[in-house]
Image: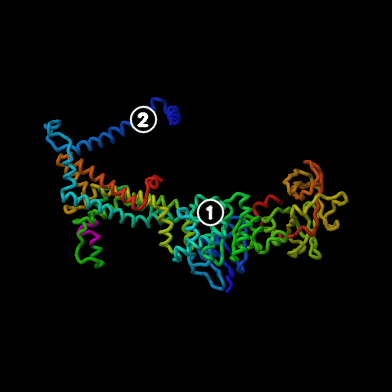
Amino acid sequence: MFAGLREAVRRFGYGGLTFILGGCAFWALFLIVLPNLMMVDQAFRPFLPRSEWGGPKDVYTIANFTLALVDPFNQLIFLKTIWASVLVTVVALANAYPISFILARGGQSGWVGILMIGLLIPFWVNEILRSFAWLLLLARLGPINDLLLLLGIVDEPYPFLRQDMGVIIGLVYAYILFMIFPLYSAMESLDPNQIDAARDLGAPWWRIHWDIVIPHSKPGIASGCIVTFMLAAGSFAVPQILGGTRSMWVTQLIYNQFDAINWNQGAAYGLVLVALCLVFVLAMMAVFRVSLKDIAK
Amino acid sequence: MKNDLELDRVVKRFGDFTAVHGVSVSIPQGEFFSFLGPSGCGKTTILRMISGFIDPSEGEIRLAGRNLAGIGPNKRPTALIFQNLALFPLMSVADNISYGLRVRGASREERRRKADEMLELVALEGYADKRIDELSGGQKQRIAIARALAVEPAVLLLDEPLSALDLKLRQHMRAELRALQRRTGVTFIYITHDQGEALAMSDRVAVMSQGRIEQMANSTDIYNNPETAFVASFVGENNMFSGKVRMTADGFGVIDTPLGTMRASNPRGLTVGADALLFVRPERVRLAGAGETTAHGDNGGRNVIESEVIDEVFEGLAVNIFMKNPKGRPIAISVTNDGAVPVLHPGERQRASFAAEHAILLPAGRLAERGSEKT
């Protein structure tokens, strides 16, 4: 460790090193540690007018958390957010798996490159603009409903936007790349001979995936799922644009509190969301026997 | 019916490139057969066609008389041992070996029994529950063989499986593979660019070059009686002299070379005027005695070449003498170390001598890459 420090001093000089370390310390302290501590602090204090700050009523309490967890409407939204994020993760995984496999195993053929570019270019556009694009596509008189009517799959336009369906579709689209890339890099590291060997020993294609590709890609699948789940649960723009009034996300609940200047309640909702997501992810990791070491790979 | 494997005028094209040009081979059940050739000669393509990963562009591959076209690798009674072995790192040794049985729906007990039986066959009893990364290179090798044999294939295909091992282990594994093949009676088809491996293990060897079989014979004939310049230059060391045929008689021919005339056996029946290459193995050349004249070819059947010693290399079993004649062409001599090999000094004048019946005339043709420096 000290050898590393000496090496750094040699390369950057004392001034440079102070600048680098100082910058990192400032960033970590003022932009990460302090705001989070402030949020925790706020969450445990009651919502009071400015004049009563520091007064006798300004004491630590868990009332904000009680409200977040006990209120049936809030409970519903927390559960819905987690459940819908799970659904988003599962749908994203189901779509990303074949795409990643083709990308990783498709060899040098030209259309793999085209597929890759086709995946990336839409993401050069801002997430909010992409959500508005989905708003047009999923609208009551939009092209997707036109197509469904034309094919006779539905008799009247399907109300994507008045339910959670629109949000889920939008979220899958918004975060699927965060699923594809970990899967792709995990699958790409699989020796193609492993697949050929399983085939040569008599395995049909689904067994090859079950026995060889999925176990090998497990760390990538796990990190893709965790990132997608966390992003979906914490997304604000997509539910705001595609959700309509009947679909409420926890992030919207939090936003409403901050909007109403009740930072204390908003901070408590935020902490509950983070804690719930964390517990859920850790539980899932235990169920699927994924360790942190796997994900770090 | 016997599981004889036949390749019938098999052609494989990749776009404009023809990797395999009409190869026909018939391999009886229980034979240890090798495809030997430099990289890019088409041997791996043949292996992948037999195992079913790619289909021939033309021709048929038949096993026990049945055309294998359209039968995928997972349905063929062949098993392949990959160059990098491709053991499954996330499965135990026993699970690796019994994987083929597992996909066939065998019960747990059946799989365990087969794994134990296979481990006994490759002398690794007690390794069933080890992880793959706990094994040494030679042990991995044997597990790969056990895994392939566990599905009881009619034909076992081996794609240079020894190339990753060090020399000592490689030589040990050669003997082991040969013994295993004899013990199981399974047809082994072995792909290699290592002539030592091919010659030491095989019943028959097909030497390949540019998608064609140059010669198919047992090891002794491949080495002693090469049929083409490619085989003569690819397999083993050879001294080579080029010239035109001046006369032929009684299975022998005399050629004019820049070093004078030389006489050699003429198994391919070259006629007068043909461009010929004369090959003679270093171990068939010796230093000429005082009584031998420098007259070429017609001196009691021996060819004698005036030369100058460049170097003498002592290798224990043999002593290699490298010489250069007045035209600058090198001649190598390999003498068995009988304890009486003379000590030679660079620059010393000596004469190389070989009998006409130990040299062979072949039609001029393409040579193996590594032999191209010898003219």
- Is residue B168 one of those drawn in magenta? no
Q: Which mark is residue B292?
A: none
Near mark 1 (Cα within 10 A), the count class, few <14, some 14-19 or many ≥20, is: some
Using the rendered image of the protein, determine whether residue B374 is visible from the camera's viewpoint.
yes
Q: Which mark is residue A21?
A: 2
Q: Are marks 1 and 2 in contact (CB under 8 Å)?
A: no
Query: Which amino acid, by three-letter code, is at mark 1?
Result: Asn
Indicate the position of residue A73 as horizontal and vertical percent values: 16, 50
What is the magenta range?
Answer: A137-145
Q: Disc 1 on helix, strand or loop? A: loop
Is A42 located above or below residue B18 in the figure? above
**Residue B114 or B309: which is nearer the viewer?**
B114
Name the side, left or right, on which A240 lies relative to B215: left
Q: Disc 2 on helix, strand or loop? A: helix
Name the side, left or right, on which B182 lies relative to A83: right
Indicate the position of residue B8 as horizontal and vertical percent values: 58, 69
Q: Which residue is mark 1?
A: B84
Query: Which amino acid, by three-letter code, is at mark 2?
Result: Leu
